[in-house]
Image (cartoon, rainbow, N blue to C red):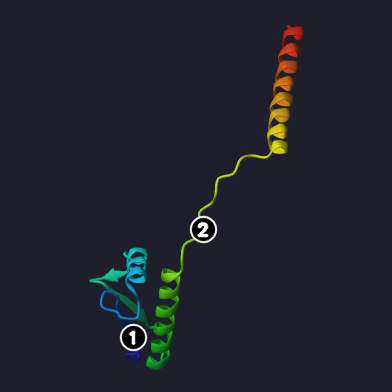
Amino acid sequence: MNTTDSRVQLIFDLENSRSLNVVLRARVSRRLAGQLVDGCLVITASEQRSQYQNRRLAEQRLITTLQAAVAPGPKTRRATRPTKGSQERRITTKKNRGQTKRLRSMQVKESD
């Protein structure tokens, strides 16, 4: 089979990187724990036939992976109380359902 040896393996040493501060490094290592090998992030690219294109692809993957890992998490939801209208709607639907069941049981007793 005629193939070219164009596979690229990019290794980013997360533990010894000076580009990330301590807080960001801890966040990235926690979020990418499953992808780290001895504290290093390994990214491979072999989709393209050109080694240069695979190198660019691996660099882009590194950038997007680190951006996603560094990004802060979503804000926590603040618990709120149900509105007065929603409480009233809930109670009325429960009462209507109970009345329907009561009417059904009365119909069954009349037919017996």
Residue depicted at 37% across the width and 70% down the height: 24
Residue wearing tag 2: 75
Residue at the image position 46 percent from the left and 69 percent from the top: 71
Q: Is residue 93 left or right of residue 22?
A: right
Q: Amino acid at mark 2?
A: Lys
Q: Position of residue 46 (x, y in %)?
A: 38, 83
Picture mark count: 2
Q: Position of residue 59 (x, y in %)?
A: 40, 84
Tell me: residue 28, above or below residue 103.
Answer: below
Q: Work out which quarter of the rendered image holds the N terminus and state it.
A: bottom left
Mark 2 residue crowding within 10 angstroms, few (<14) / some (14–19) / many (20+): few
Residue 27 is left or right of residue 99, and the answer is: left
Percent position of residue 109, x then y: 72, 8
Q: Are marks 2 and 1 in contact (CB under 8 Å)?
A: no
Looking at numbered disc 1 in the image, what kind of residue is underneath it?
A: Val
- Local SS, label 1: strand
* Left-right relation of 45 to 78: left
Judge by depth and name the residue closer to the eye, 25 or 33.
25
Q: Which residue matches tag 1?
A: 8
**First in sequence: mark 2 vs mark 1:** 1
